[in-house]
Amino acid sequence: MANTLVTPTWVTNETALRFQNSVKGVANFNRSYDDQYRQSGAKVGATVQARLPVRFEERSGQAWSPSNIYEQTTPITLSYQKGVDFAWSSAQGTLEIDRIKERYVNPAGDLLASIADRYGMNDVYTAVYNAVGTPGTTPSTNLTYLQAGLKITDLSGPEDGRIGVLDPMAMITLVNSNLTLFNPSAKISEQYRKGQFGRDALGVEEWYQDQNMPRHTTGTFTSCTPVINGASQTGSTIATDGWASGASDLHKGDIITIAGIYSVNPLSKVSTGRLQQFVITADTADSAGAMATLPISPSIVTSGALQTVTASPADGAAISVWGYTGTYALSTTVSPQSLLFHPDFAAFVMADLVEPNGGAKATFARSRDWGISIRYVQQYLLQSDQNGNRMDILFGAAPLQARLACRVAG
């Protein structure tokens, strides 16, 4: 039987397969392979526009009353070009095909998958304003995950197709807490053998563990009682005061609630009866005890098709920071962030890189089904009889509908 030689096509196909099988978090996002760059290729900084679902207002009675159509798009920037470089000799490329797969191709695919997963998850988690649990404490009961699902349901998230991606400690704690429950024996056996939660449990269709889950560092506070500074505020920034002067800060990804401000179902606009959570969208430090322009998401919208809350906050309304209540005297907490989400919560985009020149041989692994594009470039190094190789990926990730996800603090 003839040997299978190392060819550019073989390498790209093997790496793409390894990439697809290794990635966990972003593999379950809306996967978009952008073929507008198929001919000319793309570069770092190129932007794709993702279109969001249209939101309407209801009509009462028989008279025709057309809604304003709010066409919304979210820019997804191809922010990262990442890769891996290696070389093998001509003799190895002819005689040691299995060792090349083991030594080079498989590790390259695993590394590219880990890179894409890590950067993609870090770029989207800070946009998620729904959150459960306590920063610094791994959840130990099913109720925490059921509450995460409730938050998505409250905001009209689809009940089918939900995904849970947990940091490893959260996963093993969840598995351990469910080993003795009255479940099908096959599922319990799988949990026992693999140390991983099964399918179709707690309202989640698929569960994964992922060592690339982000770790959030919370802000710090000395003793203070933050409140709203000024009534009738709306929009994506809000004035506050009551912070400890020169000793308080909020980090991007921190979450707050405001007394008396409740979330609404995006379709019916009916109050959920639960306080709306707002995520801080940029690092913000206090100035003389006030944070004059605290940036938040979602925006405070009190009416219309894009309504998010029941009302604008009252002057002096108390502010609570996620995980803490009362008078603050807090130090920084580092907390792994697990996610429950519907795939339309975020998009992960890959695009073709430009074709190189200068005598290099390039091939591409492209798959619309997988949302993958990997460029493999090979060039012979005359002085050392080595085949120089590099693999590159160009990608970006962005939240599409943050309401379709919920963070679970660890």
Image (spheres, rainbow, N blue to C red):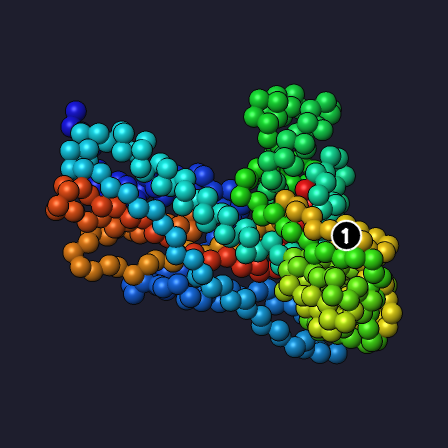
Judging by the rendered image, the residue that carries numbered circle 1 is 330
Q: Quadrant of the C terminus?
A: top right
Please give the name of the residue rendered at 32% of the width and 48% of the height, measured from the top-left corner.
391
Q: Amino acid at mark 1?
A: Leu
Numbered marks: total: 1
As rendered, which of 22 and 358 lies closer to the eye? 358
Mark 1 secondary-structure assignment: strand
Residue 68, quarter of picture:
bottom right
Q: Is 19 on the left-hand or right-hand side of 132?
A: left
Q: Is 87 on the left-hand or right-hand side of 52?
A: left
**Rendered location of residue 22, percent (x, y):** 45, 39
Please give the name of the residue rendered at 57% of the width and 45% of the height, measured from the top-left corner.
213
Q: Is 292 rendered above or below residue 365?
A: below
Q: Around disc 1, counting alpha carbons within 10 Å, would you say few (fewer than 14), some (14 to 19), or many (20 or more)? A: some
Q: Is 166 rendered above or below residue 186?
A: below
Q: Is 179 rendered above or below residue 263?
A: above
**Rendered location of residue 193, percent (x, y):** 57, 22
Residue extending farthest left: 382
Q: Quadrant of the N terminus?
A: top left
Residue extending farthest front: 246
**Rendered location of residue 131, percent (x, y):** 71, 51
Residue 45, quarter of picture:
bottom left
Q: Is 231 on the left-hand or right-hand side of 73?
A: right
Please give the name of the residue rendered at 34% of the width and 52% of the height, measured from the top-left corner.
392
Please give the name of the residue rendered at 68% of the width and 68% of the height, measured from the top-left corner.
295
Q: Is residue 159 visible?
A: no
Q: Is residue 136 visible?
A: yes
**Rendered location of residue 9, percent (x, y):** 25, 44
As rendered, which of 38 and 15 lies closer to the eye? 15
